[in-house]
Amino acid sequence: MTFLGWLTIFGFAAILTALALPLGRYMAAVYTGGRTWLDPVMRVPERLLYRVMRVDPNNGQDWKAYAKSLIIFSLAGWLLLYFILRTQTLWNWTGLNPQGFHSAPWNVTFNTTSSFVTNTNWQYYSGETTMSYFSQMVGLTVQNFVSAAVGISVAVALIRGIIGRSGKSIGNFWRDLVRTVLYVLLPISFVVALVLVFQGSIQNFGHYLVAHTVTGGSQSIAQGPVASQEVIKELGTNGGGFFNTNSAHPFENPSGFTNLVEMLLVLIIPAAIVFTYGRMAGKRRQGYAIYATMMVMFLGACVVAYVAEAHGSPAQHAAGLHTGVIHGSTGGNMEGKEQRFGIAGSALFDVVTTVTSCGAVNSAIESFTGIGGAVPMANLSASETIFGGVGTGLYSILMYVILAVFIGGLMVGRTPEYLGKKIEAREIKLVALGILITPLSALFATALAVASSAGRKSIFNAGPQGFSESIYAYLSQANNNGSAFAGYTGFIQPNAGSLGSHGITFANLLGGCVMLFARFAPILFALAIAGSLAGKRISPAGLGTMRTDNPTFVVLLIGVIVLVGALTFFPALLLGPIVQALTGHLY
């Protein structure tokens, strides 16, 4: 551990906060009809899109109509993406398949399609040996934009439900979707993509290069439109890499500066939308309280991960591998990490990507120490409440806020209220279902995977490492994250271009169904909560009303999140990374 390492972590938190505040103010203007500096540029394409879709953006929808529009749009996107990926060779006439890649097997395509439509971007395949440029750009990158926009739209709809004073309308899905893409995602993506290209990320459509080595061998160097996909991969908390090694690849993440930029991209919208909530509610302290909750848990995870990786594992100590100087620090676990990022940069990136639904990685998570590997699992166990995905994080933690308000109200013997609206049985039932869907999906799928012969075909390692791979796989897919412990597989690909490849049907179908269910079920419950709260009258706060914008409530909220996560996942963590951390055996 070094001073520079700690400065990296806490300096990052300070920069994130400084950038999130103005972006939160800007996003509040986008969703409340306020004036923005992009209005002169985006008004015309915005109106054109409404005409093409034949929708009236001023027509308010109740939660059922909003949910119906969202499901129809997502289903159409799923069918279109599946068609593009299954007919990959038919698009060779575009010139965007220079390597002549064939389509992956149907079961792998099912999993991949479900993954990108749900903002998960779980990948059983290597992008540079499986996907054509056309599939990467028109198929996957487009879904990176619209799946992120769907999550943000749901969060905005829930905000409207919480602050609404009358009626049942929670906004218009099509308007929220279009404005999210045009006013938020596209401008940031365009600017930062140029920065990535300037720093060394590639952006071309050429054939793969062949390099001849000094030993007389040869190596194929993949190319492609990387920077344009990389930026929305991070900004939309998607995480699916153009290359198999993801953000550890120098074409995706070429320098220490781009490493910082990409981490900021991952967290900037999940952080900013919390301040957006405070502004839309007219009570900025509410946003500050939620942000403080997220930041405290985020920094706690960073500290544990950094200390664990800098200290090394018991097995490394027993083998005498903890000595030596690495990046100015004595000892430490550098296995599976990039030398140019070091322990602090790798640990921070690992936490950033697992507290959100991103899943991009700049190091091998399965190579972390037992405790270091338990941190991303614990982050996923929090069910996207520590910043979370774009939009997903806000509506997830707002469910926990409502639950904390309910528990706090019971403790003081008063009717629970949040922002002047009574929290009654219907809201609590919806909140409970919305909170429990994701962990139950992950645990049920893991049980099937480790208890069935079909599921065990995907497990590579034995012992606690094999169990860790399995539970992490379904935790990641259920939380729409996409990162992995790498050993768990669903695609056998002996040749580039999918020739002779086959998928493991059990893993692909189970994972795809988990991603779809764990994405859209919580969305429906969040929208139902918005609809239930939208029509309620707001009562003035009294002397006995519990405040939800002070440090006491922050502590209560953290306690509720930790308690639910611990009760749900602690036994599973004991069987995997924790028992592995207590042994000197190398798995």
Image (spheres, rainbow, N blue to C red):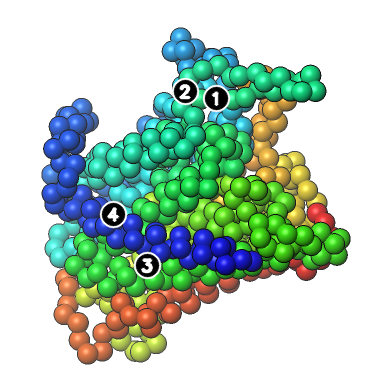
Q: Residue drawn at (18%, 63%), measured in percent from left and top?
A: 164
Name the residue carrying label 4: 23
Q: Position of residue 494 (x, y in %)?
A: 73, 25
Along the polypeptide, which appears first: circle 3 or circle 2? 2
Dividing the picture into quadrants, the one containing residue 76 is top left
Q: Is residue 177 above or below residue 260?
A: above
Callout 3 environment at 10 Å: few (<14), some (14 to 19), or many (20+)? many
Q: Say the numbered circle drawn on residue 204.
A: 2
Mark seen at residue 33: none
Whole-angstrom CA distance, mark 2 to mark 4, is 31 Å
Q: Is residue 524 visible?
A: no
SS class, disc 1: loop
Q: Residue furthest right?
A: 319
Q: Earlier in the sequence, mark 1 or mark 3?
A: 1
Q: Marks 1 and 3: which is nearer the front?
A: 1
Choose the circle earlier in sequence order: 2 or 4: 4
SS at circle 2: loop
The tag on residue 291 is 3
User: Which residue: 43% across, 67% down?
Assistant: 294
Number of numbered discs: 4
Is there CB contact under 8 Å for labels 1 and 4? no
Residue at image mark 1: 223
Residue 323 in view of the camera: yes
The image quadrant where one finds the C terminus is bottom right
Q: Nearer the viewer, residue 257 or 241?
A: 257
